[in-house]
Image (tube, helix red, strand yellow):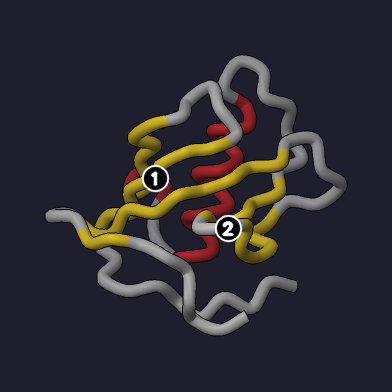
Amino acid sequence: MGNNIPFRKSKKGIVLNIRVEPRSSRAGVVGLMGDALKVKLTSAPVDGAANKQLIEVLSKFFSIRKGAVHILRGETSKNKVVEIEGVEDMPLCNPG
């Protein structure tokens, strides 16, 4: 897929659009969907479980601590805006 994930820089790191697919068979970053990074989650969107798993998946993908991932918008939506602290550029995205 290459390194073409759209993002913008913030004072603390980068901000990107995320599209989540809850209740999937496997969790992980799977690619692009329009201008958003698509992330599949096994959790259901109940009581914040999917948001918690999204933070875990993104922290693993970016190799950062969970506390550096912040959901800025979309707590109750499949479309989210997320800030990743301490990251200046996107890693190469090779989901698998």
Tell whether 29 sits left or right of 23: left
Element class at badge 2: loop
Give the number of marks: 2
The residue furthest front is 34
The answer for how far apart the CA atoms under marks 1 and 2 are is: 16 Å
**Closer to us: 35 or 12:** 35
The residue furthest top is 47
Point 69% across, 62% down: residue = 30
Residue 23 to residue 2: above or below: above
Q: Amino acid at mark 1?
A: Val
Point 61% across, 63% down: residue = 32
Residue indicated by mark 1: 82
* Residue 84 % position (x, y): 33, 54
Query: Considering only order in the chain, which callout, 2 or 1, is on the residue closer to the N terminus?
Result: 2
Element class at badge 1: strand
Residue indicated by mark 2: 34
* Crowding at mark 1 (Cα within 10 Å: few <14, some 14-19, many 20+): many
Tell whether 2 sits left or right of 25: left
* Residue 15: assigned label: none
Point 29% across, 59% down: residue = 14
* Residue 91 % position (x, y): 45, 76
Q: Amino acid at mark 2?
A: Gly
* Residue 2 % position (x, y): 56, 84
Point 63% across, 42% down: residue = 20
Which quadrant of the rendered structure holds the N terminus? bottom right
